[in-house]
């Protein structure tokens, strides 16, 4: 691993949101308070279905006359299409920024002007949507290993559109939800899940002993299914697990054994009969 790693995240895309109604437009649609985005400060947020299920998430940064969306490239077209359906009479426009990339740095990498600290965890480093990236001395795979070590979800690799619930994926502890900004699409289920203690599964980092299981491989113990594998790389991964599995010891997943590694940032109930 390079001592000052900087990588271009090749599976990300950059969109711009312009128009005088851009803040109000997004504020009523996504999970976080978009008015908090400012130069030097990014916001991590998600677009949900009306039923409160995850569709996409992205990082939002603000410039003088526009907002920049750092989004999963494979979801960028869908994200634009979904958002524009709600434009109605709002004075707002969305467009992809050709030639722009998302760059990330972590460890000892110095943060360039225009970049922002990752709003999820300080240890995650910084992110920078830019048309003029710095020379990269690390690969996207290196960044992937870094975010897996922290237990950070990576969009559709770790969540399932129209099925995943934000609080299962750590959006509360990782600052991806505002509990005070007012209504947004899917707010009712998100709030009910939190205040009624309805979270029964969590997306958790795991150590993988053996061949890396494919995404969706069932996680079991003694024949009982306790969850499923999501993304992974080089002996580490994320798995969506029922809460009792987090203290159940080694688990089976395909030909591998998994050991849950609950990160310090994750808040769990003291006990669960899920």
Image (cartoon, grey):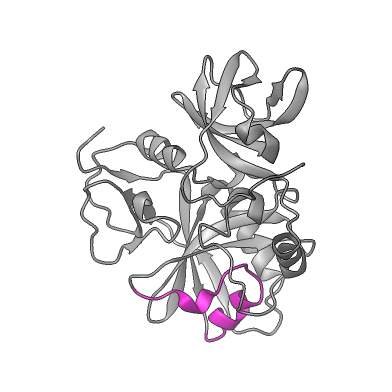
Is residue 256 positioned above or below 22 on the image?
above
Is residue 181 positioned above or below 58 on the image?
below
Residue at 61% across / 33% down in the picture? Answer: 247
Farthest residue toward the front? 270
How many badges with numbers are in the image?
0
Q: Where is residue 27 in the image (x, y as percent from the top left)?
A: 60, 77
Is residue 194 positioned above or below 153 on the image?
below
Q: Where is residue 105 in the image (x, y as percent from the top left)?
A: 30, 49
Residue 27 in magenta stretch: yes
Query: Position of 143 compared to 16: left or right?
Result: left
Residue 48, located in which quarter of the rendered image?
Answer: bottom right
Q: What stretch is highlighted in magenta?
A: 20-39
Q: Which quadrant: the C terminus? A: top right
Residue at 58% across / 60% down in the picture? Answer: 172
Is residue 1 positioned above or below 171 on the image?
above
Residue 22 in magenta stretch: yes
């Amino acid at each position: 691993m390079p001592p000052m790693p900087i990588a271009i995240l090749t599976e990300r895309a950059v969109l711009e949101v312009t128009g005088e109604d851009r803040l109000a437009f997004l504020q009523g649609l996504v999970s976080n308070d978009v008015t908090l985005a400012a130069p030097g400060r990014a916001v991590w947020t998600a677009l949900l279905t009306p039923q409160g299920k995850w569709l996409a998430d992205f990082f939002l940064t603000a410039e003088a006359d526009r907002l920049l969306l750092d989004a999963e490239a494979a979801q960028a077209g869908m994200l634009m299409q979904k958002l524009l359906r709600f434009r109605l009479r709002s004075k707002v426009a969305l467009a992809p920024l050709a030639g722009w990339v998302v760059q990330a740095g972590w460890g000892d990498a110095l943060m360039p002007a225009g970049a922002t600290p990752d709003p999820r965890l300080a240890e995650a480093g910084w992110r920078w949507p830019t048309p003029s990236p710095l020379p990269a001395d690390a690969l996207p795979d290196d960044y992937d290993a870094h975010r897996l070590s922290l237990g950070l979800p990576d969009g559709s690799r770790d969540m399932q559109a129209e099925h995943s619930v934000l609080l299962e994926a750590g959006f509360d502890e990782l600052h991806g939800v505002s509990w005070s900004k007012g209504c947004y699409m899917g707010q009712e289920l998100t709030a009910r899940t939190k205040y009624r203690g309805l979270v029964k599964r969590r997306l958790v980092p795991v150590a993988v002993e053996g061949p890396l299981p494919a995404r969706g491989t069932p996680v079991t113990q003694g024949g009982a299914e306790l969850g499923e594998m999501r993304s992974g790389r080089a002996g580490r991964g994320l798995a969506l697990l029922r809460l009792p599995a987090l203290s159940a010891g080694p688990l089976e997943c395909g030909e591998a054994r998994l050991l849950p590694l609950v990160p310090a940032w994750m808040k769990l109930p003291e006990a669960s009969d899920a």
